[in-house]
Amino acid sequence: MRSFIKRFLPFFLTLPLFAQSPKVVERGSIIEDRAARKLLQAGDARLEVGENEKALEIWESVVERYPRSQIRFEAHLRLADHLLLEIKDFDRARIHYESAAIEANGDDAKRAYAFLNIGTCFYEAGNYGKCFGIMRDVIEQFPTSSEINEAYYYIGLGHFKLGHYSRAIEALEKVGTALSSKDSLIEKVEAGKRFYVKIDDQDFAILEPGSQIKVRCLTTGGDEETVVCDPVGRNARIVMGRIPTQLNQASPNNGTLEVRGGDRITVTYIDAQTAQKDTNAKRLKEVIVVGNGVARITDGSYLHNLPAAVLGKQLHLQVTDADHDTTNGADQIQATVQVFRRKTPDEIDAELAKGVANGELEEGP
């Protein structure tokens, strides 16, 4: 009996190891992705006409019907955004953000956004300790993401809520530093990203608790928005605010800066009292709107990059560049596709012979 136990004990001990082996994540087919995309867009259309409950039902059906499709992560994000921003149901929103933040999501930008908003849900619920942990994960795991600025922003606000003013100032001073260390890039804002406003004025040190500073942002495209800035601590001389930007037709005073490629944003702040004893002096700052051009060869759903093209099949190209979105209509952009291949030995010999005949090359002995 003892020999039997000794013989089979190693086998039983290995069972947990097989159970712990990572599973291969399945991906949905292109047909599933297309169907999921259409259903997702149907939910978007319902939301645009004010049928919010129906939109939520459709997005939930995307998650249920296409559990292998990458589109399900976009549905999770839409559900989470609506629950967080409109319904203020932070716990339910966090569950959807967590579902979109898993490694199976191949889009790092969406994963960074999901991670960030997990921390946002903890912040809004008053759980600042967990918020700090998530925001630090965003900074460490996605070091090149623009979400880092938002992570520092929430870390600073959390410390401010807790009364840790020195830590709040330390975190908020890092907002904006994640974009680039080059001074030339500070004068630009990327379309679709959040626009941060930071004002340094000694007069802010005497502001009453709860006071806010308002600045106006005006675009050359005709949009005009008010940004509310908050002090970063007690007796602080710095206030900060933010506003999202979006590629769209200008719609003033809706809380979002609608911009187009090449637009300029003028920020206006009224300085109540200057060092020269002037009053109500206008302080202007101009920032140009830019876009990072990205060219991709993708599959038919335009979701996944392809490492190679297949002969006889259609080639799907996608070019994203906000600089060329200059009108309210559908703008066009031209792209050049070049094909490179190795020359055959016969082609090389023909080029050498032509060079010798033209006198460009000398014939060898």
Image (cartoon, rainbow, N blue to C red):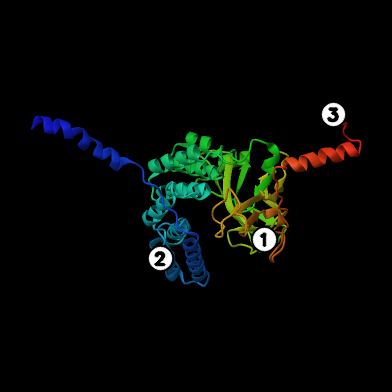
The residue positioned 44% from the left and 64% from the top of the image is: 59
Q: Which residue lies furthest to the front in this view?
A: 365
Relative depth, front residue between 291 and 117: 291
Q: Name the spot of residue 335 as percent of width and height, x first.
A: 72, 55
Q: Name the spot of residue 40 as percent of width and height, x first.
A: 48, 65
Provide the residue designation for mark 1: 223
Residue 364 is labelled as 3
Q: Which residue lies furthest to the left in this view?
A: 1
Residue 56 vertical position relative to residue 203 in the rendered view, above or below: below
Q: Name the spot of residue 236 as percent of width and height, x first.
A: 55, 38
Q: What residue type is labelled 1?
A: Asp
Q: Assign a secondary structure to mark 2.
A: helix
Label 2 or label 3, whichever comes before in sequence order: 2
Q: Which amino acid does label 2 sit on?
A: Ser
Residue 212 vertical position relative to residue 83 in the rendered view, above or below: above
Q: Distance between the residues labelled 1 and 2?
A: 37 Å
Q: Assign a secondary structure to mark 1.
A: loop
Residue 203: image quadrant is top right
Provide the residue designation for mark 2: 61
Residue 12: image quadrant is top left
Are circles 1 and 2 on residues that touch, CB within 8 Å? no
Residue 252 is labelled as none
Relative placement, left or right, of 348 versus 164 is: right
Q: Name the spot of residue 34 as percent of width and height, x first.
A: 51, 63
